[in-house]
Image (cartoon, rainbow, N blue to C red):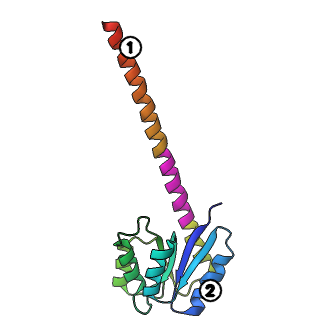
């Protein structure tokens, strides 16, 4: 089984360690990096290329939302990670902005283990659905190629008969 590469970012070490502790018990997770501020998070995402990022919003140097915006606009990253925003923010404007961004889900602080595990399950389902969609598209392309070959053979035979 291929493990999900995860980065965790939070300036509160206790929260960061709680998320890490929960994820370390998951067989399908590989924690590749942690970060304690937004700049560090951004750089580690660029360097380590995680699939999934758990990020706080209120962090020094750059907020989680600013990191997500910057990553989404970063041309050097072909496969953008999915983000789980772990936040205590209840500000309507912030939450509205978050829902307009490419964020997998929001976990409100205080959180529990089930919240973190649900986010992992949500990502796993998304990843599996994406794989299935790719397999279907590949199959359709192969079938179209096969059908095109049959049509060409049919047309050649028809042209030969008409002569």
Q: Is residue 4 above or below residue 45?
A: above
Q: Residue, x 39% and y 88% (percent of image)?
A: 62
Was residue 129 drawn as part of the magenta stretch in this picture? yes
Q: Is residue 39 left or right of residue 1?
A: left
Is residue 16 visible in the rendered image? The answer is: yes
Q: Which circle marks residue 18 in the picture?
A: 2
Q: Residue, x 55% and y 57% (percent of image)?
A: 128
Q: Nearer the viewer, residue 46 or 14?
A: 46
Badge 1 element: helix
Q: Nearer the viewer, residue 7 or 85?
A: 7
Q: Nearer the viewer, residue 153 or 143?
A: 153
| Quadrant, the N terminus | bottom right
Q: Is residue 137 left or right of residue 111?
A: left
Kindly identify which residue carries mark 1: 157
Magenta: main secondary structure equals: helix
Was residue 2 drawn as part of the magenta stretch in this picture? no
Local packing at callout 1 (Cα closer than 10 Å; few below 14, some 14-19, many 20+) is few
Segment tinted magenta in the rendering: 123-136
Q: Is residue 71 above or below residue 163?
A: below
Q: Is residue 34 left or right of residue 64?
A: right
Q: Which circle marks residue 120 in the picture?
A: none
Quadrant in the picture for residue 102: bottom left
Picture coordinates of residue 130 (x, y %)?
49, 56
Task: Please report contact status of discs 2 and 1: CB closer than 8 Å, yes or no.
Answer: no
Quadrant in the picture for residue 8: bottom right
- Separation of disc 2 and disc 1 at Cα? 70 Å
Picture coordinates of residue 88 (x, y %)?
47, 88
Q: Residue, x 46% and y 70% (percent of image)?
A: 81
Outermost left residue: 163
Local packing at callout 2 (Cα closer than 10 Å; few below 14, some 14-19, many 20+) is some
Picture coordinates of residue 65 (x, y %)?
39, 81
């Amino acid at each position: 089984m291929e493990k999900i590469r995860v980065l965790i970012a939070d300036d509160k070490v206790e929260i960061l360690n709680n998320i890490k502790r929960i994820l370390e018990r998951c067989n399908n997770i590989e924690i590749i990096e942690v970060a304690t501020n937004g700049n560090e998070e951004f750089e580690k995402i660029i360097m380590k290329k995680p699939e999934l990022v758990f990020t706080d919003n209120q962090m020094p140097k750059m907020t989680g939302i600013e990191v997500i915006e910057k990553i989404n606009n970063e041309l050097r990253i072909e496969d953008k990670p999915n983000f789980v925003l772990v936040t205590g923010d209840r500000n309507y404007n912030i939450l509205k902005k978050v829902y307009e961004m490419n964020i997998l889900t929001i976990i409100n602080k205080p959180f529990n283990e089930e919240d973190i595990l649900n986010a992992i399950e949500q990502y796993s389902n998304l990843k599996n659905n994406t794989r299935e969609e790719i397999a279907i598209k590949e199959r359709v392309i192969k079938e179209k190629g096969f059908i095109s070959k049959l049509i060409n053979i049919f047309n050649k035979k028809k042209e030969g008969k008409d002569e």
